[in-house]
Amino acid sequence: METLTTNTKKPQLVTNLEVMTILEQRIKAREQAENDNNDNNDSVNNTTSNNTKKKTKGVRHRDWIESQVIHYLQVTPCMKADLDKMPALVSKLRTPISKGGYGLVQSEILQILNFFPTETVELHLIIDDLQSRMSEEKQTELLELIAKNMEADEDDGHVEGDGDDVEMEVDDGQQQEEVTATENG
């Protein structure tokens, strides 16, 4: 993968959703370029086709890795984010507590945007020294703010990738017990 460079010397942090967008754009651009090359190869002789095969062979692992990253990101909580609400959410998270915000640093905001915590215990894992920085009421308010900035699930509340559909590699008797236990609660 290429390193994203900016005018600043400090590396820029990107959310999982931004990584997903970048990868999708790169794959789409490559597919478009391949389609254009295939159209040109039909009118020219096959020597150009051999050059394309050499290039493709050299980057075959990159394509697989990118597709696996996209597949993984599609089942993470960040994919339920409402992009239109993101700038306001980031602003509110960054605003100091004394001014009605939450006073989070950039790395904490990034983790919230990637994981969209739904429980207080998750906030404790993301935000350093949470108990001394926020009251329990403020923590609950933060969770409510995060929930408002996620798109509503259209189905019965089942979240993809929440572990219900994970199969364990054990014998059939044990596997059946695991599925039954998961279905019953």
Image (cartoon, rainbow, N blue to C red):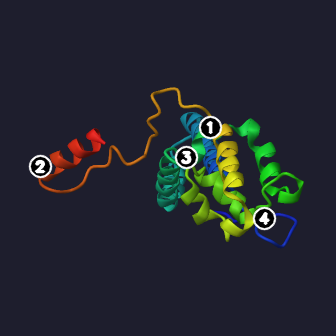
Where's residue 183, x and y in %? 27, 39
Which label sits on residue 5?
4
Q: Are marks 4 and 1 in contact (CB under 8 Å)?
A: no
Q: Secondary structure at mark 3?
A: helix
Q: Nearer the viewer, mark 1 or mark 3?
A: 3
- Spatial separation of the CA atoms under disc 1 and disc 3: 36 Å
Q: Residue at x 67, y 66 (%)?
A: 130
On the image, numbered disc 1 is attached to which residue?
Answer: 36
Gap between marks 4 and 1 measured at Cα: 29 Å
Which amino acid type is shown beneath numbered disc 1? Asp
Type of amino acid under label 4: Thr
Q: Residue at label 3?
A: 77
Q: Secondary structure at mark 2?
A: helix
Label 2–label 3 contact, CB within 8 A:
no
- Residue depth check, mark 4 versus mark 3: number of the one nearer the observer: 3
- State the mark number for residue 109: none
Q: Nearer the viewer, residue 67 or 184?
A: 184
The reply to whether the C-beta atoms of the residues labelled 4 and 2 are less than 8 Å apart is: no
Q: Amino acid at mark 3?
A: Pro
* Circle nearer the N terminus (4, 2): 4
